[in-house]
Amino acid sequence: MEAKEKSARRQRWLWAFNVLLLGAAVGLWQKLQWKKTSDTPSGVVWQRMNTTHTDRNRDGRVDEEIIRLSSGDAAIRRDTDLDGWFDLRYAERRGMARQLEQIREEAPRH
């Protein structure tokens, strides 16, 4: 009888652990999934955790990427000529652009 009780207890523990693991996976999936937050004539905006993507000309390529940092600053990449390639990277501190750098990086698709 004692062996059956241990087996039943182990099965309940494993079932509860699996439910907890499934809940964590669903929660993590929701955080990692891009969510469309705005769709207006001026463009489409997606957000995932601390990153925002904007497609201004609706070509399916990101025209601006903003990554909010824990300090309140932001790291920004921008496609200034809307050709599907990021041309500019800079940090924004207290609303001021700093460390401007010309780049040539392919913009991701949405």
Image (cartoon, rainbow, N blue to C red):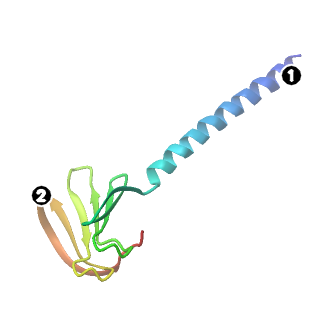
Q: Is residue 28 left or right of residue 88?
A: right
Q: Quadrant of residue 90?
A: bottom left
Three-letter residue code for mark 2: Gly
Q: Is 84 above or below relative to 16?
A: below
On the image, the x and y values in percent for residue 86 come to: 29, 77
What count of labels does the image hold?
A: 2
On the image, the x and y values in percent for residue 56 come to: 27, 70
Q: Upstream in the sequence, badge 2 or badge 1?
A: 1
Q: Quadrant of residue 84?
A: bottom left
SS assignment at label 2:
loop
Residue at image coords 21%, 78% = 80
Q: In this view, does 92 lie to the left or right of 15?
A: left
Q: Is 26 above or below relative to 3?
A: below
Which residue in the structure is indicated by mark 2?
A: 95
Q: For this rendering, which residue is in front, 47 or 37?
A: 37
Give the spatial CA distance, label 2 vs label 1.
66 Å
Would you call the spot at circle 1 few (<14 residues within 10 Å), some (14-19), or many (20 or more)? Answer: few
Q: For this rendering, which residue is in front, 61 or 59?
A: 59
On the image, the x and y values in percent for residue 67 come to: 29, 59
SS assignment at label 1:
helix
Which residue in the structure is indicated by mark 1?
A: 3
Q: Are discs 2 and 1 less than 8 Å apart at CB?
A: no
Q: For this rendering, which residue is in front, 110 or 99?
A: 110
**Image quarter of the N terminus:** top right
